[in-house]
Amino acid sequence: MSSDQRRVENLSGIEIESVYGPEHVGKLDYKRDLGAPGEFPFTRGIYPTMYRGRLWTMRQFAGFGTAVQSNSRYHYLLKQGNTGLSVAFDMPTLMGYDSDDAKARGEVGRCGVAIDSLADMELLFRGIPLDQVSVSMTINGPAIVLFGMYLAVAERQGAKFEELRGTLQNDILKEYIAQKEWISPPSPSLKMINDIIRFCVESAPLYHPVSISGYHIREAGSTAVQELAFTLYDGLTYVAAAIEAGLKVDDFAPRLSFFFNAHNDFFEEIAKYRAARRLWAREMKRRFDPANAASLALRFHTQTAGCTLTAQQPHNNIVRVTLQALAAVLGGTQSLHTNSLDETLALPTEEAVTIALRTQQILAHESGVVQTADPLGGSYYIESLTDRIEAEARVYFDRLDEMGGMVAAIERGFPQGEIHRAALAHQRAVERGERTIVGVNAFVEPERKSGVPILRIDDTVEKEQVRRLRRRKQARNGEAVAAALEELERVAERNEDLMPPVLDAVRAEATVGEICDVFRKVYGEYRETVSL
Amino acid sequence: MECGFVAVVRMASEGNHKLRVLVAKVGLDGHDRGVKIVARALRDAGIEVIYLGIHNTPAEIASAALQEDVDAVGLSIHSAAHLTLFREVIRLLKKNRAQDTVIFGGGIVPDRDIDKLKKLGVKKVFGPGASIEEIVRFVKAISRVREAKAGHGASR
């Protein structure tokens, strides 16, 4: 067989033809399946003129060391033209432990910023007016605590809650599925998410209370189809839970947002974003029938795929990131993080992150791709692939429905197992040489050392942070803290709204660990059943 | 040697010593894509694998390694806390006279930390892009060393 007749599959195992034509899109109905940009089912984008109206937000994810160090990186990024901020917390914060906890040893400030109390959060946003800059926070298990601190800082800055724009990741389902930073089991965690959504509906209407994330699912090894299917199904699960908690779909659905990965297969990624919008619009309409069209429109942030970066010949990563970012833009993303070339080795240096940001600026201001909405709409290949991805994601939807929903599926290990199998298959394909990775299994340069400078997190960060935490604990009003924590425990036990007592506790300078200890005590800790 | 002796006893009772390896994530990061692939590949290669999952403290890992009497411990970490946490695992193993346990690791580890880890006693660090074939080969080589050691012990 000649090489042009060989069966070719993309990264999701979808067979790809060598040429596409009208026969592949014969059933496509423009009005029903595409619609103009800004119109149902939003396949072509959620705004009529897309980037001519407004560019995507350039939002580099950052955070390391102490609050002071991260604050200085944020000021640097804003000065370089970053148009939104995105906070990376360290592992102890993500798991709800203080910096002086035994479990935090060695981890403080290492892969994100260490935040223990309101005092740290104030330093983190010093000189950054929260009523003007939109801030995204990657925090899930303890999301309610960090959101409370964010609100309290805004309050001290004199900002009104109704002016706050930003995003809380607050997506616990994908933690159980892929990212695995959690505190409590599903049921109390979903309850906390509903408390946050309700607070935003009533008091912070511009804020995005949940960012339903496929990024981590993909990084854990899923295919594009699995990323899409599990993420949108998580989203439908949150909507159903909020409605069950008494919220009206049109009050909160327009503020939900999504977060996808931009992986290597250029056309598949573009088709994935288009399929995501159409599938979300159709399923939201079918399942919940909202009156407001904004409830059907899928907004999303994109990050280029960290797992595609290579430690070998790291400058090649700049090219990978450029292609991935271009796919996200052609797919109509609302905001974008581009990875830095050194991120398989450590957190990015200032120089590396600047190149990553410049990549976005070149796409936005030099390439011309921003002038036309959905420029690939109507391509035989893209439309056919969009259909196929939507159809395959629906197969997963049916299986998840049959299992009794996502929480039941997670408890059975279903999405985890599907992702693990896909990761294993990919790794084997790479090792057999069926998937080429330049610099790793082809075009290798064994003698060359990577030679890029690495950001070092000083060992003194942990000591300094622990000292600071102890000082703050001595300086605060201990009785007020104890009273606030007792009240929080009482509210948690009665299953009442957690937002007011959490806000009071953070204002009294109760720490992340102290507040999460209450959750651990009342709700217990999540444990996963491991299977290989 | 103590471990050699243990291996001899096991070989005598079981007829042949099957290599036992503990594989775990240490610390708080939950990135388990790589570690699960490694655990699975080692198992597929006929090695007895005890997979401890994520979020393990050094004490939990050392205690499991001792209880399960493993020949090697493979640690995965992506949170940049490797120096502190690997050091602690090694200290606890030494303290419990299990210094012969072979320690290897993988994850996001910058080149210059690899040398530091080796000085601490980590036999091998597999960075991003390492193949499972390479890792299986490494672990099987441990098996040969230990069997040789066991054989040596038996002849004494």
Image (spheres, rainbow, N blue to C red):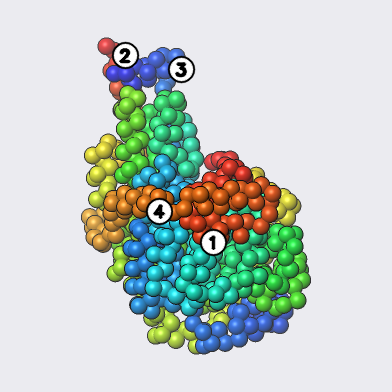
Q: Residues within 10 Å of mark 3 (few under 14, many from 20)?
A: few
Q: Is residue A521 visible?
A: yes
Question: Closer to the observer: label 2 or label 1?
Answer: 1
Q: Which one is nearer the viewer's eye here, B107 or A511?
A: A511
Q: Earlier in the sequence, mark 3 or mark 2?
A: 3
Question: Can you give x and y, in whole percent of width and height, for residue A317 in the image?
Answer: 36, 66
Q: Chain of mark 2?
A: B
As drawn, is B151 to the left or to the right of A45?
Answer: left
Secondary structure category for the residue under label 1: helix
Residue that appears at 31% across and 49% down:
A463
Question: Can you give x and y, in whole percent of width and height, for residue A311 in the image?
Answer: 33, 57
Tell me the CA gap for discs 3 and 2: 15 Å
As drawn, is B2 to the left or to the right of A118?
Answer: left
Position above or below: A311 against B142: below
Q: Chain of mark 1?
A: A
Residue A148 shows which numbered tag? 1
Residue hosting label 2: B154
Q: Is residue A278 visible?
A: no
CB within 8 Å, label 1 to label 3: no
